[in-house]
Amino acid sequence: MVLAGGEGKRLWPLTEDRAKPAVPFGGLYRLVDFVLSNLVNSDLHRLVVLTQYKSHSLNRHISTNWRMSSLMGDYVTPVPAQQRTGKKWFAGSADAIYQSLNLVYDENPAYVVVFGADHVYRMDARQMLDQHIASGAGVTVAAIRVPREQSAAFGVISTGDGRHIDAFLEKPADPPGLPDDPDSILASMGNYVFTTRALIDAVKRDAENEDSDHDIGGDLIPALVAAGEAQVYDFGTNVVPGDASREASYWRDVGTIDAYHDAHMDLVSTRPVFDLYNSSWPILTTALSLPPAKFVHGEPGRTGSAIESLVSPGCIVSGASVRRSVLSPGVKIHSRSEIEDSVLMHGVDVGRGAVIRRAILDKGVLVPPGATIGVDLELDRARGFHISEGGVVVLGKGEVVPPE
């Protein structure tokens, strides 16, 4: 089960018209492609994706791009809120599973893998599943070491013997550090493996609890910890084929505009920590029927070039300079324009002589000739553009850029 119902409020305006897992990433992909690739590469081929908010583009992406072999009974299926338990939306991640228990009953598996859809990483889920089976636990929670000062953003895990969870604190302000590293904590990644009976019992008990928020991290896991049924899986031990040692334990929550932008800037670096070019564990998505990227003009001041950048099929860089940026399919950059430290999504058209710096432009944005974005933040605020805490300018899907 992939939990893909999040609103993604902190990624607004990128989530103004789509669910967070449907947000484009890395030029060709959507965020949901990373978790689905990890599960499929781990030989887990019966997947349901639970969706809810603004799910049309997400449902369409999964239905048209993620097709498995029906001959072997494999599938990837988007499942919206079905209202099987009443006229209500999912009240939380635990409630999403409770309302979707028919999917579990239909398959009757011994174990259920429950992963979130919002993160960028590589992981062999089979290794976590094997540990869970060997342990006999009711639930195993994947965890990663993060700095202690970031604890308020995570569920924090405390262990006694290294695997058995003796406390699970949801977003604590001041948790104790690890015994071997007081400045770090074990943070939940939002990935779980459940023994099926334990999952069914837990979500049913939670559904009857009127005081519950019906959240996996906030309610289900603490209850299973109290019952002595929870263990931890150390993501740092996970080995993925083709990974360089520097990529080990790479996991990014791109839930804010600044984190989303930073993750892209890592991708375009000379030696990125997260390598999209690992063919042994590919990030999968459907290849578009577009022509190769094209760079034209080579005269002084009007040379089509892209340095430390990802340029997707269908792009045309015509006498313009692109540096440390990601161009999604179909982007057109006209002569004497300058693009730096930016992410341009599908179909963006940048007019002649425009300058764009530290910006994210969503699908279909048209930048008029001579316009500037990210050069003068006060001007950008006056024009109503969204600006993140870190100074990244964001234009939503189809947003109109007024001429200067």
Image (spheres, grey):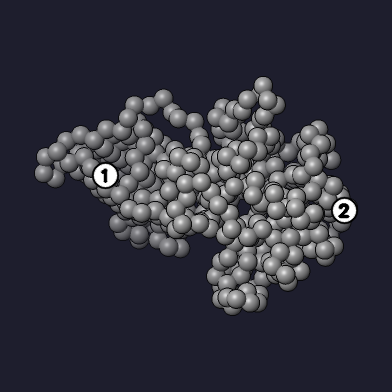
Q: Residues within 10 Å of mark 1 (few under 14, many from 20)?
A: many
In this orientation, does residue 140 appear? yes
Whether residue 170 can be seen here: no
The image quarter in which residue 64 lies: top right
Q: Residue 315 appears at what percent x and percent y? A: 32, 34
Residue at point 67%, 63% (across, down): 155
Q: Going from the N terminus, do you reach mark 2 or mark 1 first?
A: 2
Residue ranking furthest to the left: 300
Q: Quadrant of residue 220?
A: bottom right
Q: Is residue 368 left or right of residue 6?
A: left
Residue 302 placement, left or right of 86: left
Percent position of residue 311, x then y:
34, 40
- Asked whether 98 or 122 is in front, the reply is 122
Tell me if mark 2 has few (under 14), some (14-19) or many (20+) residues whose alpha carbon lies within 10 angstroms of its own: some
Tell me the residue at 57%/75% (across/down). Answer: 181
Looking at the rendered structure, which numbered label has been put on residue 33?
A: none
Q: Which residue is mark 2?
A: 205
* Amino acid type, callout 2: Arg
What is the total number of numbered labels drawn onto the structure image? 2
Residue tagged by mark 1?
A: 306
SS class, disc 2: helix
Which quadrant is the N terminus positioned in?
top right
